[in-house]
Image (cartoon, rainbow, N blue to C red):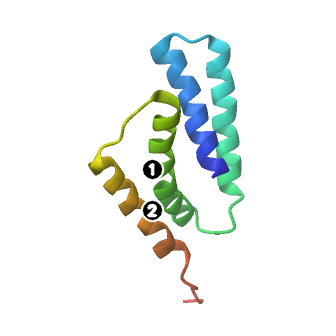
Amino acid sequence: MLAGFCEIGGGYLVWGWLREEWPLWLAILGGAVLFLYGVVAALQPISEFGRVYAAYGGIFTAMSLLWGVLVDGFRPDRYDVAGALIALTGVPVMVAPERGAG
């Protein structure tokens, strides 16, 4: 959840600078928060980079829609919600199974 907040929040600050003419210092802060996202993602207990990021993608999808609702007043339609649910369903499929050597 922290990784998602960092990526979405940092990206939002950069977006605001580029698209909404917010002050440059917010873009710089956004860059720092995006760097923190990279650190948080690297600290996850799963050792495979691809699996961490793939599983995180499902969480990121749902968090992005929630951010849009809470921060931007975005109203997701049924396709947005269905897509987020499909993405979230994949997360436990990737991270829950015990995996043995070879």
Give the x, y percent position of residue 93: 46, 75
As drawn, the residue found furthest toward the left would be 79
Q: Which mark is residue 88?
A: 2
Q: In the rendered structure, which amino acid carries the disc numbered 1? A: Thr
| Snapshot quadrant of residue 88 | bottom left
Give the x, y percent position of residue 87: 40, 60
Secondary element type, mark 2: helix
Secondary element type, mark 1: helix
Give the x, y percent position of residue 40: 70, 51
Residue nearer the viewer, 23 or 47: 23
Q: Which mark is residue 20?
A: none
Number of disc labels: 2
The residue under the point 61% across, 20% down is 27
**Left/right of residue 78 with respect to residue 50 in the rendered view:** left
Q: Residues within 10 Å of mark 1 (few under 14, many from 20)?
A: some
Q: In the rendered structure, which amino acid carries the disc numbered 2? A: Leu
Q: Which mark is residue 61?
A: 1
The residue under the point 62% across, 43% down is 5
The residue under the point 65% across, 19% down is 26
The residue under the point 52% across, 35% down is 70
Residue nearer the viewer, 79 or 9: 79
Where is the C terminus found, in terms of image quarters? bottom right
Residues tagged 1 and 2 counted as in contact (Cβ below 8 A): yes
**Left/right of residue 38 with respect to residue 22 in the rendered view:** right
Instruction: Establish if 23 lies above or below 76.
Output: above
Which comes before the other along the chain, label 1 or label 2? 1
Instruction: Establish if 37 lies above or below 97.
Output: above
**Disc 1 and disc 2: Cα gap in Å?**
8 Å
**Left/right of residue 67 with respect to residue 80 in the rendered view:** right
